Amino acid sequence: MRANMSLDVTAIKRDFPILGQEVNGHRLVYLDNAASSQRPRVVIEALERYYERDHANVHRGIHELSTRATRAYEGAREASARFIGAADPSEVVFVRGTTEGINLVATAWGYENVREGDEILLTVLEHHSNIVPWQLLARRVGARLKYIDIDEQGRLRLEQLDELLTERTRLVGVTHVSNGIGTINPVEEIVAAAKRVGARVLVDGAQAAPHLPLDVEALGCDFYVFSGHKMCGPTGIGVLWGRRELLEEMAPYQGGGEMIEIVELERATYKRPPHKFEAGTPNIADAVGLAAAMDYLERIGRERIQAHERDLLAYALERTHEIPGFRAFGPERDHSGVLSFELGDLHPHDVGQILNDRGVAVRAGHHCNQPLMRRLGVTATTRASFYLYNGRDDVDALCEGLRDVIEFFS
Ligand code: PLP
């Protein structure tokens, strides 16, 4: 029997206290989830509980609270591994978020493995955080950056892989799901091609981990990164997953307490991964909050969340079809719940402003995707992005708001 795929959005919405408010005299319609999601009460309570009952520093102490905090922190690591299908929790490094995870790899792996004349292959869909760290590395070591282009629908042009991948390619960096236009990329295919030339693959999962079922072992990539705040978790916490053998051979990213074994005046030895990459007191409470968020999402089921977002996108495309001047970006198939669009020649900031007057929160701008915007021939788009607590009534509010925008400027 097929599991019931539909979500009880009304009940889910009640789990998120922030969504119960009015903004500018209207019901808050929160459609800025690609930038940051909201938190359910269980996550807020997990943070509160941790601070009220369990907090102490981890790993070093022998007293009860330190034991509890360590158990909670390492438990969050195990939960993170399960959440992404990783067999070994020691392959999970806690970082501040996707940005820090990519910088960690570009620095700790990159400086050891990328040399003058080597190549790093990215895509024009990348967020700045999967471009700039590689630019910094490439400039320092004299490597070259190359980019996979997109077709007219915004899908990666995979036929370019044969030409772009060479024996000099050391790393392929690709976003699992585009934050700019919602394209879901065929990561397995890209990994298979990269492996043929011996390149490592880093996948930016910031827009994927919160929204779809995930199995990093099946994807076959070498590194996978994502942020807690986009998946109902706290800000300031995220995950870098890396293959054990790569983490073992990588140099530390930062030095300090917690990451060492023995320190002498001139040298030090380091702990094994993941601790080698977690210098200083870690973000214990937010790791605990992240585990609560993962548990919440798992109980609902990411398959159902993905199906729900797909349904909302289809409904939104159907409804916006009738709006004069509305043009959506992104592919017809393999499109996440990110709806980026233009409304005639109106500036996205004006569109976003008027929607805000009606309580509808969307994002307007380049979405940290300046190369993609340039490729699309626009400076900015308006972006509505859906999550598990959005319903068709939210799409209706967006459409009504867009009609108001048109009327305001006509
Ligand atoms: N990569 C993608 C695809 C994103 O959407 C984002 C955030 O919008 C990031 C990376 C950066 O994430 P963070 O700011 O949480 O480090």
Image (cartoon, rainbow, N blue to C red):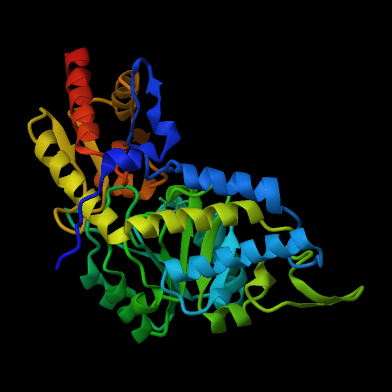
Quadrant of the rendering where the C terminus is positioned: top left
Instruction: Identify the residue at horizontal 32%, vertical 47% (top origin).
Output: 180
User: Residue 20: percent from the left, percent from the top?
Assistant: 39, 29
Report the front residue among 139 and 169: 169
User: Residue 11: percent from the left, percent from the top?
Assistant: 31, 41
Considering every residue shown, the one lying at the far right of the view is 265
Instruction: Identify the residue at horizontal 19%, vertical 37% (top origin).
Output: 392
Report the front residue among 334 and 130: 334
User: Residue 373: percent from the left, percent from the top?
Assistant: 32, 44
Asked whether the viewer can see residue 95, the reply is yes
Q: Is residue 265 above or below residue 38?
A: below
* 86 with respect to 124 (left or right): right
- Count of marks, rendered view: 0
* 286 with respect to 215 (left or right): right
Asked whether the viewer can see residue 280, the reply is no
Q: Is residue 334 above or below residue 110?
A: above
Q: Quadrant of residue 69?
A: bottom right
User: Residue 46: percent from the left, percent from the top?
Assistant: 56, 49
Q: Is residue 390 above or below residue 281?
A: above
Considering every residue shown, the one lying at the far left of the view is 322
* 160 with respect to 217 (left or right): left
Instruction: Identify the residue at horizontal 68%, vertical 79% (top origin).
Output: 272
Quadrant of the rendering where the N terminus is positioned: bottom left
